[in-house]
């Protein structure tokens, strides 16, 4: 205590097997529960609740997933980094607070955490660049085809489209699930649209 003044903040370092998940974009904060494994060690602030999630995993460095349109950060897996921690005061004036009782960070293997965060980042990008009304049927078919070609499962694709459709206030979100099902119903050898068609639509 004698090393701190009353107004000082404190930080936690992601070393010794700790990694911090930082859903930076508002979409990532909103979608994280749908994609990221649970952990008993979460904190945030009023405007970004549960926006820091701590895990035990192995990452040699920080990995940032960005929107290729404006290069803004969507979500990061932070390693060998220092993050402001409760009860610090954020520069915006809000106090950081633990989410409920603080428990042990969940142990998650590197591949599982990486995949879940990639899916989260994908959902954020889809939500940001959601198709305008009038072209959503074809857009969803081509998006589903692109995701399938990249190894995304039908269940994962549904989670991505469900989250992004809600964010984009798509009144026909149920139709998106039908379009996903039709794409994944194709046999592996059947032709279906993908990235080329999606690029043309976008």
Image (cartoon, helix red, strand yellow):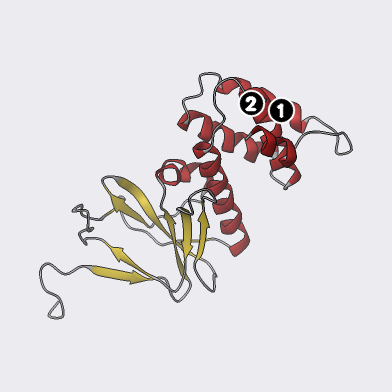
Residue 129 position, x and y percent, is 53, 37
Image coords of residue 61 (percent x, y): 51, 72
Secondary structure beneath disc 2?
helix
Residue with the most extreme right position: 189
Residue 187 rendering spot, x and y as whole percentages: 86, 34
Q: Which mark is residue 181?
A: 1
Residue situated in front as seen by the camera: 135 or 54: 135
SS at badge 1: helix
Mark 1 crowd level (few <14, some 14–19, many ≥20, 10 Å Cα): some
Q: Residue at x 44, y 54 (%)?
A: 39
Residue at 52% across, 67% down: 57
Kindly give the residue lying farthest to the left in the view shown.
6
Q: Are marks 2 and 1 in contact (CB under 8 Å)?
A: yes
From mark 2 to mark 1, how far is it between C-alphas?
Answer: 6 Å
Q: Is residue 15 above or below residue 174?
A: below
* Location of residue 113 (image quadrant): bottom right
Quarter holding the C terminus? top right
Image x and y of residue 198, in percent: 68, 36
Q: Depth check: give the residue in front, 96 or 55.
A: 96
Identify the residue at horizontal 63%, vertical 26% (top origin): 177
Quadrant where the N terminus sits is bottom left
In the image, residue 153 above or below residue 82: above
Quadrant of res 11: bottom left
Taking the view exactly as shown, the residue that stands out farthest to the bottom is: 3
| Mark 2, residue position | 177
């Amino acid at each position: 205590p004698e090393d701190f003044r009353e107004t000082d903040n404190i930080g936690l370092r992601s070393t010794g097997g700790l990694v911090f998940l930082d859903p930076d974009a508002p979409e990532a904060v909103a979608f994280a529960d749908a994609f990221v494994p649970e952990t008993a060690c979460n904190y945030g602030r009023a405007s970004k609740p549960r926006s820091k999630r701590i895990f035990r995993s192995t990452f040699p460095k920080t990995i940032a997933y960005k929107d290729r349109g404006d290069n803004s950060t969507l979500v990061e897996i932070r390693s060998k980094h220092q993050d402001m921690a409760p009860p610090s005061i954020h520069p915006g004036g809000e106090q950081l607070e633990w989410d409920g009782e603080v428990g042990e960070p969940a142990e998650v293997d590197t591949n599982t955490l990486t995949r879940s965060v990639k899916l989260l980042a994908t959902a954020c990008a889809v939500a940001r660049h959601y198709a305008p009304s009038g072209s959503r049927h074809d857009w969803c078919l081509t998006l589903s085809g692109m995701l399938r070609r990249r190894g995304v499962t039908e269940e994962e694709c549904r989670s991505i489209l469900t989250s992004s459709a809600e964010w984009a206030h798509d009144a026909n979100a149920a139709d998106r699930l039908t379009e996903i099902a039709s794409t994944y119903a194709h046999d592996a050898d059947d032709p279906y649209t993908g990235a080329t068609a999606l690029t043309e639509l976008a």
